Image (cartoon, rainbow, N blue to C red):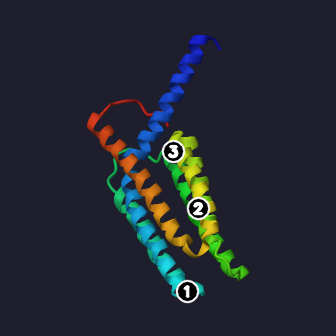
Amino acid sequence: MNREEANQALELIRRVVSQARDDSSLQNWGAIWMFHGVTNTTGFAGTQWLWSAGHRTPHAYAVLWAIILCINMVTIFLFKRGQTAGARSFIERQIWAIWTTLVGGMVLAAFCNWLLGLDRLFMPTVSCILLATAFSMMGALMGRIWFIVAAFLAVMSLVMACLPQLAFSMLAGVWFLVQFGAGLTLHRARLRRLASQRPEARLV
């Protein structure tokens, strides 16, 4: 490969990465994440209230999060209805995989916490670590700023480990900050892209 071919390949990679970001924006993930930032924060705040009230069996938590997850799933399809970004792209498939894995891992961590019968609540700390991992994977797809968020989440997981009785309250605040903030960033990118209406060939 000569220098000209290498430059062409590099430019193609840049266009693929740029379009990946645009696709995630055009598919309305920004609005979805902002809405889910509110619903998930409400869920974690409710979980903290249940825990502080002395609930130690999974039933109340299961009902709360079944409602939250149902709302989240329904709103994904409502927000994406009528979108015009075309067939599901590679980047969108990765978003689905990352966040589905995150949710599954958090549910499993909560179940393990209950099965072990520990007097310490490690589920919020583990959830924050899983969220940091998810944002790190997003960084590989979407840009370096996501790695900074992942590092922040990693630090907050250590803080939660030191204050386990307040961990769900802290997780609620952290979750709102990172998910609503990420959603706002994507939504603003979507508005800019739609305003520019740049015609270009699809690469992914």
The residue wearing badge 3 is 91
**Relative image position of residue 25 (x, y in whole percent):** 39, 45
**Direction left: furthest residue:** 195
Between marks 3 and 1, how big is the CA–CA gap? 36 Å
Residue 98 falls in image quadrant:
bottom right
Where 174 sits versus 7, above or below? below
Pointer 2 residue = 128
Which secondary structure, mark 1?
helix
| Crowding near the residue tagged with mark 2, few <14, some 14–19, many ≥20 C-alpha atoms within 10 Å | many
- The mark nearer the N terminus, 2 or 1, is 1
Between 128 and 23, the residue placed more toward the observer is: 128
Tags 2 and 1 in contact by the CB under 8 Å rule? Answer: no
Tell me how many marks there are. Answer: 3
Q: Which amino acid type corresponds to the residue marked 2 in the rendered image?
A: Cys
The structure residue drawn at horizontal position 62% and vertical position 71%, both measured from the top left corner, is: 123
**Three-letter code, disc 1:** His
Pointer 2 or 3: first along the chain: 3
